[in-house]
Amino acid sequence: MTSPALYYVTDADLVDRIGEQAVRDMLDHDRDGTPDAGKVLRLLLDAVSYIESFLRGIYDLGVLRALSPPPNEVKRLVLDRAEAELYCRHPEFARFDGYKAKDRNDQELQKLATGVRRLDVIGPPEPAANQGGTTGSFDPRPASSTARMFDDLGDFG
C-alpha cells in the first residue's frame, strides 16, 4: 500500500496515526488482506481538499504544498479529518465519535482561517501579521446614524 505523497501526508502517515490493523479493517473492501490503495488515496485526497478549502485565500497553496517537510500543523489537520471521516463511516471500529472529531476539526480550521491560530512555520507561507482587522475613516466628522436618501437626483447635499 503505497500511494503518492499528497502534498502533506502519505498512507504511511495514516497507518502511523491509527495503526495498520485499523487501516486494514476499515479500508480493505475486497478482503484480500491489504487496504485498497484507491480507498486510501480517496480518503486522503478528500481530507487534503477539505483542509485546503479553509487555507485557500489565506495561504499561498503553491508555497505550502512545496514545503518539505510540510508544516506539521497542516499534516495533523489532514490526518485528523481523515481519521474522523473513517470513524463516521465505520463506527464499529471507532475509538471516539467521528462526528464530534469533525466538529473539533472545523473549529480548529476556523481559528486558522480567521488568524486566531497560525501554522507552525516562520515566514512564508504565513500571511502578514497585519492582515485583516478593522479599518476606519479619518474623517473628523461623526458618522451619521441615519441612512441618506436621495429623493431628488439633482440635489446631493
Image: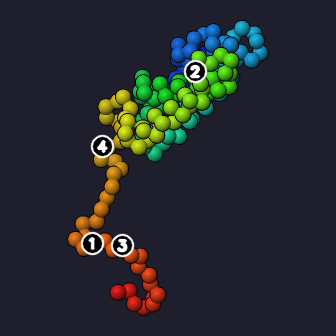
Determine the residue positioned at 40% across, 90% down: 155
Question: Could you tell me which residue is drawn at 37 percent across and 39 percent down?
Answer: 116
* Residue indicated by mark 2: 96
Residue underneath mark 1: 142
The image quarter containing residue 111 is top left
Q: What residue type is labelled 4?
A: Ala
- Quadrant of the snapshot with the N terminus: top right
Q: Pointer 3: what residue?
A: 145
Q: Where is residue 114 in the image (x, y as percent from the top left)?
A: 41, 43
Label 4: how many Cα within 10 Å (few below 14, some 14–19, many 20+): few
Say if 68 sits above or below 148 in the image: above
Mark earlier in primary sequence (4, 3):
4
* Labelled pair 4, 3 in contact (Cβ < 8 Å): no
Left or right, residue 89 beside residue 16: right
Residue 6: % across, % down: 55, 26
- Closer to the chain start, of discs 2 and 4, is 2
* Total residue callouts: 4
- Tag 2's secondary structure? loop
Q: Are marks 2 and 4 in contact (CB under 8 Å)?
A: no
In which quadrant of the rendered view does residue 4 lie?
A: top right
N-term mark: 2 or 1: 2
Amino acid type indicated by mark 2? Phe
Three-letter residue code for mark 3: Ser
- How many angstroms separate mark 2 from mark 4 (CA)? 36 Å
